[in-house]
Structure formats: structure tokens, C-alpha cells
């Protein structure tokens, strides 16, 4: 089967159709099919072409019917419409219905080529993203992000799939540490076929911790009526996720260290080494380096866990992800048979300004709540019941004395700039010139800062339409 992108060109003017088709065939690595009518074009849509280029005036009807057919069949096909000068109003209506662009006839072939190449590039990127999401699994799909820092993490997750390296995930509560651990599991070439076993180290009583991890033999202690496998054995061939590993009792940490080093365990009350083939992913919302200094966490275990470290940024540091996540969660929690909730610009602005102490989990819970409790199709800012100003400057400020003052100042300044630019871009609907006027900076300075912080101004054009 050909891997070339498929294009469908629909025009009843045979010479024009042949001229455009020949041009595209010469310029693109694509397969161009043609049709001269609605009747001829409709069956060819079944092949789900990457791009449909259609005249609006066809001998057996309105080319707009093809656009509707694409929408009704939920095809991924992008649409470009062509029209004579008198049909511009109809073409504008077509773009509002989802057409990528419209071209007036006679068509400027160079402009057509640019539009087609852009459409095919977008299609290729979407396929790459979808292939990656399928490869890494459902948990990865729930972590969609436009943040530069998150994209780096996603790239590293893909690389981790080729090894069984121990991973340490560091992040605040609600940032998605377990989801990221599951993504690592799904990406693993060796271990994704095995189970994913999670242990919340903060929830296991200290007296039961060793048995929980390593299992026990019958009669090894009071109440041990049967032999029991621990989490290490349960995760055999898969991934063991140690959540909040910083809460592990200090007395049991040497046994975990030994299991990681020697790749075998012993059940409580047993003396037979049991080999384990397990990838260990640990997570913490604490600074383990501080725990080491305070004598609450073994330094040698920290280094054993900290082979590859993934620092998950809190949601307040990646506000550009808020509209993306809101859209995804609204789709997920839409009541059966109903469209997802829409959020007014004021509601979206309120969410952009909120500091999200509960991070992505808090945002997910909020969208779920309004999706099932708000009767209106649009969610207003007042429906959110957000406190966007927990302190006088709009956020809670923590002082980390483990860092030099100049580093704290630099990080605080960067955070303030990102939050300011987020609000300014939202107000300017992604227009750099307007954003420059709001901030009192030059366009060049604004552009440089947008690049530095990884902002995508297109995302803020979308915010205004929510």
C-alpha cells in the first residue's frame, strides 16, 4: 500500500482540474485523484483522503455538501474550497464550517501549493502524535501539553522505553506522577507486557511495610496464615511504582536498596533469594536531598533511585496548558449524548489566573464538576467558584532557603514574567503587537520572551474563542 498522502480534487472544468492535478503531482510526493461531480466525489471520500480541494459550484449540486459529508463521517480530511468571485460569501461560510482555506478562481498555484503543504504538514504531525500516543498508551494521552518542559519529559519517556533504568519522578501533589509512571511502563519495550503495580508508601503501616513489598512465608509472624507474595513479585516482568517513596521508614530502606542492587528479594521469614525482573519507578513530592541531610532518607538509596530524574512542573508554571487540558477534560466528562461544555473568555481567564495548588488533578475535578452540575451550555467565571487571589500578589509565595538568594530572585522574576505574559497574551488574543503595547515593551522583546518561555501565541487565539 502506498504511503503517499492522498488528495482529492473536485472540479467540473476538466482543463482546470487537469492543470491543477498535474501541478500538484509534480510538486508533491502525493497521490492526487480527481472528480468532476458530487456523485463521482462521494465514493472517493471513503478512502479518507488527507485533503479535499473542491469547487463550490458543481453540475449536480453544491460543493458545500462534500464539506458536510466530511463532517458527518467524522473524517480527518482537511478541506480547501475554490470559488469564483461571486461565491466569496459562500466560501467564507465554508471556512466557518471547518474548511481550511478558500481560493478564488483562477487559482494562484503558488498560493495553493503553500496551503496544501501546510495542510499535509499538519496531517503528518497529527499522525506522529497519534502514533506516539498509541505507543505510550492511554495514560500518556491524558498528559497532553504545549509546555516546553513537558515536551522534554515526553521525549525522555520515549527514550526510557529502550531500557529498564530506575526512574525518580519529582513533583507536587496532583501533577500526574502516577500517570507519568504508567506512561513509562507503557513505553517500555521489555516491561509493558507485564503488570503495573503501585504502592503508596505513605499509606502502608510501618509494621506491614516489609511484608507489603517483599511478601512473607506462612507462620513468619502472628497472623501470617498463608504464604503471600509481595509487590515486587506481583510486578514480575512489569513495573513497580513506589509513590511517595520519601515516606518509606528509614529502617526498611536498606532492604529496598539491596533489592535494587542485587535484583532479588527474600520474603519475610524466608531465606531463599527470589530473582525479580522489575523496572522500579519512584515518585515523591518532597525534596529527597533535604530528607538525606536530615537523616530521614539514605543517601545511597537516593542515588540508586535518582538514576534518571523527571521533574514535573506544577500547573501554575505552564499556564499555556490550561486551555488544552480544559478542552480535553470537557470532552471526557460531557454527559452522554451532549456536547462538551464551552467556557466563556471570562471563565478561561479566571482559570489562567488561578494558581492551582492542587495542580492538574484540581483542574480535572473542577471541569468534571461543572460538566455535570451546570445546566447551561456555556460555563461562566462565576460557575467556577475559584479564588484567583490567595494572597495580595495573586499567588502563594514560598521561600526555599536551600537556594541562593539570586537564584530565588531569578526564578521568581521568570515566574512573574510568564504569568504576566499569559494574561497579556490572553487579553491580546495572541497578537504580539497588542501584547507589546499592553506591557510597554517592544515587539522584539516580547517575541524573544515568548520564545524563551516556550509560549505558542496560537493557543491564546483559541482562548478568546472558548
Image: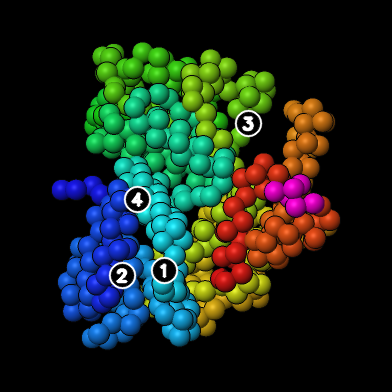
- Up-down: is 105 above or below 269? below
Q: What stretch is highlighted in magenta?
A: 442-447
Q: Are marks 4 and 1 in contact (CB under 8 Å)?
A: no
Mark 4 element type: helix
Question: Which of the two labelled residues, at mark 1 and mark 2, occupies the earlier sequence position?
Answer: 2
Q: Are marks 1 and 2 in contact (CB under 8 Å)?
A: yes
Question: Which of the two labelled residues, at mark 3 and mark 2, occupies the earlier sequence position?
Answer: 2
Residue at the image point whose x is 26% and y is 18% from the top = 274
Q: Distance between the residues labelled 3 and 4?
A: 56 Å
Is residue 360 rendered to the left or right of residue 183?
right
Q: Distance between the residues labelled 1 and 2?
A: 9 Å
Q: Which mark is residue 107?
A: 1
Residue 177 in the image: state x and y as whole percent.
49, 42
The residue that disc 3 covers is: 287
The residue that disc 2 covers is: 16
- Up-down: is 251 above or below 243? above
Is residue 148 rendered to the left or right of residue 409?
left
Amino acid at each position: 500500500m502506498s504511503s503517499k498522502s492522498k488528495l482529492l480534487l473536485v472540479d467540473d472544468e476538466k482543463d482546470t482540474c487537469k492543470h491543477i492535478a498535474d501541478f500538484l503531482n509534480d510538486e508533491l510526493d502525493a497521490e492526487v485523484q480527481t472528480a468532476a461531480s458530487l456523485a463521482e466525489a462521494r465514493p472517493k471520500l471513503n478512502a479518507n483522503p488527507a485533503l479535499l480541494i473542491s469547487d463550490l459550484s458543481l453540475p449536480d449540486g453544491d460543493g458545500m455538501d462534500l464539506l458536510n459529508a466530511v463532517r458527518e463521517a467524522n473524517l480527518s480530511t482537511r478541506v480547501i474550497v475554490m470559488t469564483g468571485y461571486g461565491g466569496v460569501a459562500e466560501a467564507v461560510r465554508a471556512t466557518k464550517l471547518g474548511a481550511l482555506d478558500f481560493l478564488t478562481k483562477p487559482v494562484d498555484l503558488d498560493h495553493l501549493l503553500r496551503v496544501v503543504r501546510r495542510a499535509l504538514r499538519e496531517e503528518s504531525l497529527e499522525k506522529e502524535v497519534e502514533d506516539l500516543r498509541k505507543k505510550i498508551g492511554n495514560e500518556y494521552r491524558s498528559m497532553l501539553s504545549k509546555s516546553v518542559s513537558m515536551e522534554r519529559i515526553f521525549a525522555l519517556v520515549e527514550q526510557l522505553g529502550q531500557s529498564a533504568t530506575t526512574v525518580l519522578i519529582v513533583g507536587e501533589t496532583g501533577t500526574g506522577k502516577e500517570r507519568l509512571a504508567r506512561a513509562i511502563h507503557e513505553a517500555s519495550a521489555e516491561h509493558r507486557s507485564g503488570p503495573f503495580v503501585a504502592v503508596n508508601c505513605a499509606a502502608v503501616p510501618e509494621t506491614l511495610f516489609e511484608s507489603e513489598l517483599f511478601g512473607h512465608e506462612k507462620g513468619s509472624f502472628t497472623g501470617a496464615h498463608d504464604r503471600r507474595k509481595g509487590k515486587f513479585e506481583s510486578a514480575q516482568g512489569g513495573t513497580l511504582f513506589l509513590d511517595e517513596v520519601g515516606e518509606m521508614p528509614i529502617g526498611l530502606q536498606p532492604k529496598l536498596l539491596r533489592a535494587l542492587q542485587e535484583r532479588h528479594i527474600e520474603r519475610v521469614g524466608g531465606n531463599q533469594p527470589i530473582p525479580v525482573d522489575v523496572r522500579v519507578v519512584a515518585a515523591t513530592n518532597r525534596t529527597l536531598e533535604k530528607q538525606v541531610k536530615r537523616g530521614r532518607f539514605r543517601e545511597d538509596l537516593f542515588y540508586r533511585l535518582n538514576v534518571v530524574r523527571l521533574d514535573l512542573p506544577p500547573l501554575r508554571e505552564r499556564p499555556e496548558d490550561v486551555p488544552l487540558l480544559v478542552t480535553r477534560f470537557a470532552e471526557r466528562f460531557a454527559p452522554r449524548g451532549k456536547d462538551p461544555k464551552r467556557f466563556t473568555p471570562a471563565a478561561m481567564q479566571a482559570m489562567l489566573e488561578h494558581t492551582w495548588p492542587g495542580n492538574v488533578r484540581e483542574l480535572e475535578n473542577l471541569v468534571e464538576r461543572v460538566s455535570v452540575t451546570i445546566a447551561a451550555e456555556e460555563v461562566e467565571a462565576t460557575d467556577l467558584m475559584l479564588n484567583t487571589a490567595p494572597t495580595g500578589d495573586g499567588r502563594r509565595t514560598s521561600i526555599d532557603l536551600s537556594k541562593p538568594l539570586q537564584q530565588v530572585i531569578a526564578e521568581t522574576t521568570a515566574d512573574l514574567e510568564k504569568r504576566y505574559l499569559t494574561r497579556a497574551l490572553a487579553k491580546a488574543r495572541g497578537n504580539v503587537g497588542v501584547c507589546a503595547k499592553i506591557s510597554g515593551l517592544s515587539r522584539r522583546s516580547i517575541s524573544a520572551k515568548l520564545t524563551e518561555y516556550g509560549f505558542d501565541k496560537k493557543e491564546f487565539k483559541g482562548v478568546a474563542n472558548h
